[in-house]
Image: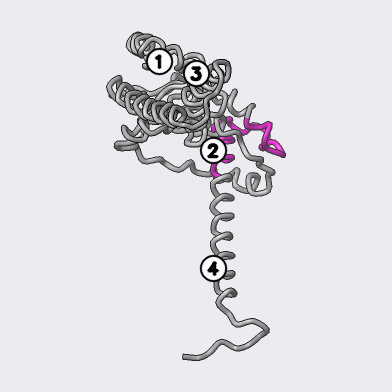
Amino acid sequence: MDEGIVTGEGVLLDTRPTSFLSRVLAALIDLTALGIVLIATVLVLGGADFAPSEAATRILSIATLATVLVVLPTAVDTMTRGRSLGKLGVGIRVVRDDGGPIRLRQAFVRALTGVFELWLTFGSVALICSIVQPQGKRVGDLLAGTYAVRVRGKTAPRTPVMMPPHLAGWAAGADVRRLPDGLALSVRQFLTRTATLHPQSRASLGTDLAVEVQRFVAPAPPPGTHPELFLAAVLAERRRREHTSAEAGRQRAAQESLLMQRLPHGVPDPVD
């Protein structure tokens, strides 16, 4: 049985930590790529025609190392949302502890810590930490609050959250603002895992999530509405509205495409 990741809200996520070998292989590919970039940069600067002073050479060397070892990995992880060259090659991704995509802060912390645990110690610190840590995190992951997950292989089919019939009218007229990604993920995972939770934990988590979600919904649901039914109604209504908006967008695009093909100024189209 595959183990999942439990978020701070106590919800079990479907994403699973990667194997130790996958992380090592991805790290080797990334380090090799960075090493090639570093060597190429040194060769280009070494073959330049200008001869800088000793102080300028020292500053240039530090700037080059900082760019290749910190700035470049930070930019790559931020723009690819945790899928660098090595991670893309082995089918893994770095995500936050709550399952969301990493941001600039997490990418910077991982890259800055990597200078010590990957380069200065030849990867020994990262290797030991990954072996000892249950989720396979290296020091940079512990400080940044991230971990690596598999994004390939079979995925369990998602069961759509159904709208409770007696709440359909209320949900259709409610103002449902966009939920934060982490909160929406937690709600969905909670609703799909309710049968596996302890009754007391289920009631506590459902109530806490309903309180959080209610901040983004107005008016409140009818008095006496069960927290789980309220959460299901919100997710189902969000899905309905997103589907309606996407369908309207497709229809507008199709109509605009037809208009673009028409002749201007009311000139009738030629008949074949």
Using the image as rendered, state which of residue 99 and residue 215 is in the foreground.
Answer: 99
Amino acid type for the residue under numbered disc 2: Ala
Residue 27 in view in this figure: yes
Tell me whether circle 3 and circle 4 mark residues in contact (CB < 8 Å). no
Using the image as rendered, state which of residue 207 and residue 59 is in the foreground.
Answer: 59
For disc 4, the marked residue is 254
Residue 130 figure quarter: top left
Using the image as rendered, state which of residue 245 and residue 79 is in the foreground.
Answer: 79
* Mark in front: 3 vs 1: 1
Residue 208 image point, x, y percent: 59, 23
For disc 3, the marked residue is 201
Disc 2 from disc 3: Cα separation: 18 Å
Disc 1 from disc 2: Cα separation: 48 Å
Label 2 packing within 10 angstroms: few (<14), some (14-19), many (20+) = many
Earlier-in-chain disc, 2 versus 3: 3
Disc 3 from disc 1: Cα separation: 44 Å
Magenta stretch bounds: 213-236
Disc 4 from disc 2: Cα separation: 33 Å
Tell me whether circle 4 and circle 1 mark residues in contact (CB < 8 Å). no
